[in-house]
Image: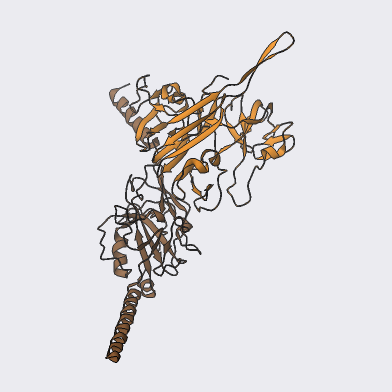
Chain colours: A brown, B orange
């Protein structure tokens, strides 16, 4: 065999070999279905029955000042959140994992999240990549399930200003255990794994209620609640003052 | 990592001027102590045959006699659980020796497998019928699996992945409520497990005294074990050299300590297993596959990987 032919033969062999070496993918499951596995509750500790959860990695600064669910803050987090089931490839500003989108990532009628995304590109989520759940309580928006990894349609809904005007609550969660598994592996994001002992900031936004997590309310609700609390305190204080005067 | 006890029961029958040795199948158990991490897990045992005989395949069916129909049922599940076969026909002789075909229907005097290839029609074969080893046979409630968290990944032949969890003490789908402990683990195949903390997996059954042919498909990750409960298997002692297509198919062996780091990539030169520079392994350089573990095999076209029996029949 001529030297050049032999080189071509070896290159061809190496190309075939590298092509057939493996089909790299991981799977991610959300486990948040009851008090044992933990649940994501709304800001009033009630089950969430409308909304969905996104799962992915964060590629920018975790800015803790942007915790309130406003449209501006949403745009910030959306720009740095890379979803495991985002099929965007090649031309997008972010390249997602291209995994399947399970319907179980929409909150169920009993407030549960379950099911798995599979076929997630392990190259996008290498071993030990920190993973996050970004959960929304929102009306009229949900993930569209698809069964085929890498499908070209977009299955993650965008929220707009109308959604935030109507009131959105959210939580951004992670835990020490939420690190991408090795190629071919599966990771379960169990809500009850979020504890005060985590070395990562966990949760990012949301309140830890033991096994479960409560969402951050919309700012107006929070503001109203603060005003209400202030009025109650003021009223009590005023009553106390009046009482004091009466005693005098 | 494991404890193994094998028992060969032999009974000498002495009669009118002659003696006869009757041997029962070798049975045993293995315990696997796995630390937190990710593993390829492949059971090495099978279940005892519920029927063994010979016959001619006709219209994808085989005649049987003396089989209680209920012992092979159900052949399907329609109660909301995933639909899996309970039993399989293991071909013992001929071209398809070692291949397992699901029992898809059964009557008082015949068993049928719709998976039988046309080439088997008209062939006279010896065969055995066995119950599938299932996930609930392997991952019992006392395994130490963390509920809702530790996960078993079943890589299906169509490229999909079925995820199974422990919830409420039973194996479930990833909805954590539908029972799926009857998910079969086909002979010679395996699953991938992800563990948050240490567990002990206890398996038991018969040591297979015949070869096992594991079907492998292109475009997917095929998990193939060793069917050798007595110890680790050196790659040079395996059939990978002839089961893999030369310079194309590969077998990836991962570390078995939970880190799932790449251990070795095995190719073939057409007769011998080679490293990724296509140099045949020597006895000193040969990678090994641990008992209870396996390899991820990628192939360019459909075929079989043959696993030799670890015992002489």
Image coordinates for residue A142, horizontal then vertical, percent: 44, 64
Q: Quadrant of the C terminus of chain A?
A: bottom left
In terms of image quadrants, where is residue B220? top left
| In the image, residue B287 above or below residue A238 | above
In terms of image quadrants, where is residue A87? bottom left
Q: How many marks?
A: 0
| In the image, residue A74 above or below residue B30 | below
Residue B298 in view of the camera: no
- Please give left or right for residue B279 compared with residue B47 in the image: left
Kindly identify the residue that appears in the image at 65 percent across and 25 percent down: B126
Image coordinates for residue B24, horizontal then vertical, percent: 62, 23
Image coordinates for residue A114, horizontal then vertical, percent: 47, 55
| In the image, residue A24 above or below residue A147 | above
Closer to us: B170 or A185:
B170
Closer to us: A27 or B23:
B23
Kindly identify the residue that appears in the image at 55 percent across and 44 percent down: B181
Image coordinates for residue B179, horizontal then vertical, percent: 56, 49
């Amino acid at each position: 065999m001529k030297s050049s032919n032999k080189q071509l033969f070896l290159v061809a062999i190496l190309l075939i070999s590298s092509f057939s070496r493996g089909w790299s993918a991981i799977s991610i499951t959300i486990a948040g279905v009851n008090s044992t596995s933990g649940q994501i509750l709304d800001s009033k500790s009630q089950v969430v029955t409308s909304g969905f959860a996104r799962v992915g990695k964060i590629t920018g600064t975790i800015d803790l000042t942007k915790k309130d669910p406003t449209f501006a803050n949403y745009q910030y987090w959306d720009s740095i959140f890379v979803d495991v089931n985002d099929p965007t490839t090649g031309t997008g500003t972010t390249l997602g994992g291209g995994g399947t989108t399970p319907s179980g990532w929409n909150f169920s009628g009993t407030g549960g999240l379950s099911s798995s995304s599979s076929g997630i590109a392990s190259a996008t989520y290498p071993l030990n990549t920190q993973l996050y759940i970004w959960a929304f309580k929102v009306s009229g928006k949900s993930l569209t399930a698809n069964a085929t990894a890498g499908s070209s349609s977009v299955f993650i809904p965008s929220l707009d200003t109308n959604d935030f005007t109507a009131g959105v609550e959210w939580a951004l969660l992670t835990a020490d255990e939420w690190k991408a598994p090795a190629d071919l592996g599966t990771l379960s994001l169990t809500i009850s794994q979020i504890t005060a002992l985590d070395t990562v900031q966990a949760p990012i936004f949301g309140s830890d209620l033991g096994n479960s997590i409560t969402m951050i309310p919309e700012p107006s609700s929070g503001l109203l609640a603060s005003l209400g609390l202030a009025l109650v305190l003021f009223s009590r204080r005023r009553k106390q003052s009046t009482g004091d005067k009466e005693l005098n | 990592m494991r404890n193994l006890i094998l028992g060969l029961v032999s009974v000498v029958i002495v009669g009118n001027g002659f003696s006869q040795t009757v041997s029962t199948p070798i049975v045993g158990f293995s315990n696997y102590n796995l630390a937190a991490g990710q593993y390829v897990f492949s059971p090495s045992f099978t279940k005892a045959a519920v029927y063994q005989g010979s016959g001619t395949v006709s219209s994808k069916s085989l005649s049987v006699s003396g089989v209680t129909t209920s012992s092979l049922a159900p052949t399907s599940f329609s109660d909301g659980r995933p639909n899996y076969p309970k039993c399989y026909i293991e071909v013992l002789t001929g071209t398809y020796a070692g291949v397992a075909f699901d029992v898809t229907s059964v009557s008082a005097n015949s068993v049928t497998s719709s998976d039988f290839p046309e080439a088997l029609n008209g062939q006279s074969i010896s065969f055995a019928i066995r119950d599938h080893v299932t996930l609930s046979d392997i991952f019992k409630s006392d395994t130490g699996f963390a509920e809702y968290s530790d996960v078993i990944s079943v890589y299906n032949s169509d490229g999909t992945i079925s995820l199974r969890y422990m919830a409420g003490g039973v194996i479930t789908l990833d909805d954590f409520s539908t029972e799926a402990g009857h998910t079969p683990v086909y002979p010679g195949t395996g699953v991938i497990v992800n563990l948050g903390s240490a567990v002990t997996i206890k398996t038991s059954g018969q040591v297979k005294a015949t070869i096992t042919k594991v079907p492998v498909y292109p475009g997917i990750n095929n998990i193939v074990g060793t069917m050798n409960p007595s110890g680790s298997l050196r790659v040079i002692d395996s059939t990978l050299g002839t089961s893999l297509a030369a310079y194309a198919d590969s077998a990836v062996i991962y570390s078995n300590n939970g880190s799932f780091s790449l251990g070795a990539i095995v190719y073939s030169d057409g007769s011998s297993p080679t490293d990724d520079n296509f140099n045949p392994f020597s006895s000193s350089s040969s990678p090994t596959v641990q008992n209870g573990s396996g390899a991820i095999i990628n192939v360019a076209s459909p075929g079989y990987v043959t696993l030799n029996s670890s015992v002489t029949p």
